[in-house]
């Protein structure tokens, strides 16, 4: 089975395009639009994201703006869970909680509806990519403030050289399909 999973991982990896110097010089942007265009990669990515969590009790998948929405809803459906968006400031229509996180130059915020997660809810945080871990860490803090329990993290791509997983809740499974 390990060889099958490696073949799937290789296939998915080969559909992800790298754009040099975007959005600024020195950044190697991982573009998943080419993955989304490939119907086989689309199906295999959904399968691989759900696989590690299939036998777990999950109440919500929290998708991070905005590319975390693309597979987060599929993941929630595959796990028979609800989906909750975490968005940039001013994008959610009801009362929100906000959490700041550091950027390379400055800071930013993400928000969640105050009534999105019930106390004791089991939550998976999903995004397309983990780099420094700032956004996922901020989402973790929001979920904890609402009384939720983080039971996993899910990413398509992990840029391991940036050590983003060090920012996440310890002793919680972190699943990434493509690790660079």
Image (cartoon, grey):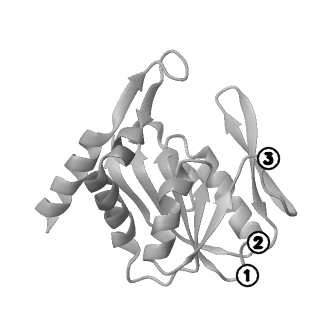
Which mark, by number, is residue 119? 1
Closer to the eye: label 2 or 3: 3
SS type, badge 3: loop
Asked if disc 2 and disc 1 are in contact, CB closer than 8 Å, the reply is yes
Mark 2 and mark 3 lie on one chain; the one further toward the N terminus is: 3
Q: Residue at x 35, y 45 (%)?
A: 37
Return the disc, 2 or 1, that comes first in the chain's sequence. Answer: 1
Q: Which residue is mark 2?
A: 146
Q: Residue at x 38, y 83 (%)?
A: 55
Residue 89: assigned label: 3
**Which image quadrant for residue 122?**
bottom right
Query: Helix or strand or loop: what does disc 2 sit on?
Result: loop
In-image side of 63 versus 35 (left or right): right
Q: Is residue 3 left or right of residue 55?
A: left
> Which badge, 3 or 1, comes first in the chain's sequence?
3
Assess disc 2: are there few (<14), some (14-19) or many (≥20) residues with their C-alpha within 10 Å of its C-alpha.
some
Quarter occupied by the C terminus: top left
Place of residue 3 in the rendered image (x, y in percent of width and height, measured from the top left): 11, 60
Relative to 162, say whether 96 is above or below. below
Give the class, few, some or many, for how many residues have Cα within 10 Å of label 3's Cα (few <14, many ≥20).
some
Q: Is residue 79 visible in this depiction of the protein? A: yes
Residue 22 located left or right of residue 19: right
Q: Position of residue 80 (x, y in %)?
A: 49, 81
The local secondary structure at tag 1 comes to loop
Q: Nearer the viewer, residue 178 or 73?
A: 73
Locate the N terminus by quadrant. Answer: bottom left
Please, is residue 169 above or below residue 79 in the view? above
Q: Position of residue 138 (x, y in %)?
A: 68, 53
Distance CA(mark 2)–CA(mark 3)? 18 Å
Q: Position of residue 16 (x, y in %)?
A: 33, 39
Q: Residue furthest right?
A: 95
Q: CA distance from mark 2 to mark 1?
A: 6 Å
């Amino acid at each position: 089975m390990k060889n099958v999973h490696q073949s799937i991982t290789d296939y998915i990896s080969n559909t992800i395009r790298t754009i040099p110097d975007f959005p600024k010089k020195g950044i190697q942007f991982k573009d998943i639009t080419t993955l989304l265009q490939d119907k086989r990669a689309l199906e295999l990515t959904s399968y691989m994201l759900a696989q590690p969590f299939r036998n777990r009790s999950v109440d919500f998948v929290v998708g991070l703006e905005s590319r975390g929405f693309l597979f987060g809803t599929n993941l929630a459906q595959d796990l028979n869970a609800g989906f909750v968006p975490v968005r940039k400031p001013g994008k959610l229509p009801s009362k929100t909680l906000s959490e700041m996180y550091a950027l390379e130059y400055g800071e930013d915020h993400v928000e969640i509806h105050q009534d999105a997660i019930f106390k004791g809810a089991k939550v998976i945080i999903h995004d397309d990519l983990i780099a420094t871990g700032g956004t996922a860490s901020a989402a973790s803090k929001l979920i904890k403030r609402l009384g939720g329990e983080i039971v996993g993290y899910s990413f398509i791509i992990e840029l391991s050289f940036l050590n983003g997983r060090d920012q996440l809740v310890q002793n919680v499974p972190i699943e990434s399909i493509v690790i660079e």
